[in-house]
Image (spheres, grey):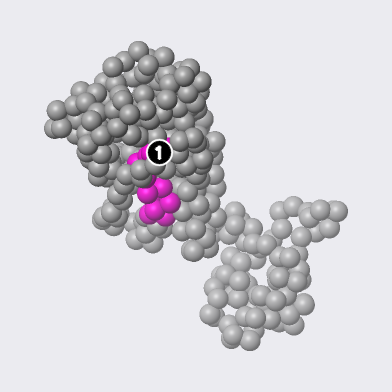
Amino acid sequence: MSDSMDIADDATRPVAKARGGRTAPTIYDIAALAGVNPSTVSRALSKPGRVSATTQKKVEDAAAQLHYQVNVFARALPTGRTNTIGLIVSDITNPAFFEVIRGAEAAAAERDYTLVLAESAESAEGELTAAQRMLATVDGIVLASPRLSDEQIRALAAQKPAAVINRRVEGVDSLVADTDAGVTDAVRHLASLGHTSLAYVAGPERSWMSARRWESIKARCDWSGMSATVVASGVPTLDGGRRAAAAVRASVATAVFCYNDLMAIGLMRELQGAGVRIPSDLSILGFDNIFGSDFTTPPLSTIKSPLRESGVAAVQRILEELDQPRTAFESPSLVTELVLRGSTGPVGR
């Protein structure tokens, strides 16, 4: 019996019974239905191209008729691959990650990989636990807006190919959008409307991207002769924005950047409930341009992030590393852009 037969047989042998107690189909069932040898089924399923096109179609049709599914974990025994990639996001309820997930899924599916998803719920400890569990079964892992330390991320990357989104970690492939592009246009826009004092409602303390966004805002304000202050919040949710409302109202700022769109929407709702007119009394901007950011009244001005593109690029990088380990990484161009809507306006309009 050939090695390919042994490998495919191991990979296709059922490990459980189907619903109703019936045994899941094997390559022997497919062979009987297709009228070919089991070894031919093995070659057709494990290495397409080693059998004729006619035979390949017979095997595939029989497999489909029997609702046959390959056991990827059994296949991993001889190959070391499960054709799965893990993706961990910091908050699965945040619409900002919807496009990241869609992009990652599309890139994985294009290469016949399955995306395995988990979330950390903004917890570094939960993120580490999820990553350690994933690494036992996936071929590579993507961390989106991770809360782990740089050392912890490097330790994970030393085990299997890894990529990071919205975070720069030395020694690890990182996908980071050019925040300065969108912020520069936003500050210039606010200055043209007469604003001279801005506030930034910060994200989680352990968020690398929150600090990066503040650095960009502060640098652009300094260059424009505008004052800029930070309002601590820490919770990147609607509730986090609501909590920051009192501090924002007590400040002298006439325009506010929020760490993300969810916080900006929460802040807007809380202030409007207190009688503050947006944008007549206060202009508000968010980050990310999530789905629903234009559903508010007024619609939210925001800085669009290339979320889907980041997900695609991260998975593609993992696949490149799997094909050719230790290849040089050139990050694609990921640029932010200002999206103007109704939540920004002239001072004291």
Q: Name the residue under label 1.
A: 342
* Disc 1 residue type (three-letter): Gly
Q: Nearer the viewer, residue 110 or 12?
A: 110
Q: Is residue 128 magenta?
A: no
Q: Tell me: residue 203, above or below residue 175.
A: above
Q: In this view, which residue lies farthest toward the front?
A: 349
* Residue shown at the point (84%, 58%) measured from the top left: 22
Q: Taking the image as drawn, is residue 39 in sight?
A: no
Q: Taking the image as drawn, is residue 111 in sight?
A: yes
Q: In which quarter of the image is residue 322?
A: bottom left
**What residue range appears in magenta?**
300-314
* Residue shown at the point (36%, 24%) measured from the top left: 281
* SS type, badge 1: loop
* Residue shown at the point (54%, 36%) measured from the top left: 93
Q: In this view, which residue lies farthest toward the right?
A: 20
Q: Position of residue 294 (x, y in %)?
A: 47, 42
Mark 1 is surrounded, within 10 Å at the Cα level, by few (under 14), some (14 to 19) or many (20 or more) other residues, namely some
Instruction: Give the side of residue 9 with respect to residue 125, left or right.
Output: right
Q: Tell me: residue 292, above or below residue 63.
A: above
Q: Where is residue 263 in the image (x, y as percent from the top left)?
A: 44, 29
* Residue shown at the point (71%, 70%) measured from the top left: 64
Q: Position of residue 137 (x, y in %)?
A: 53, 47
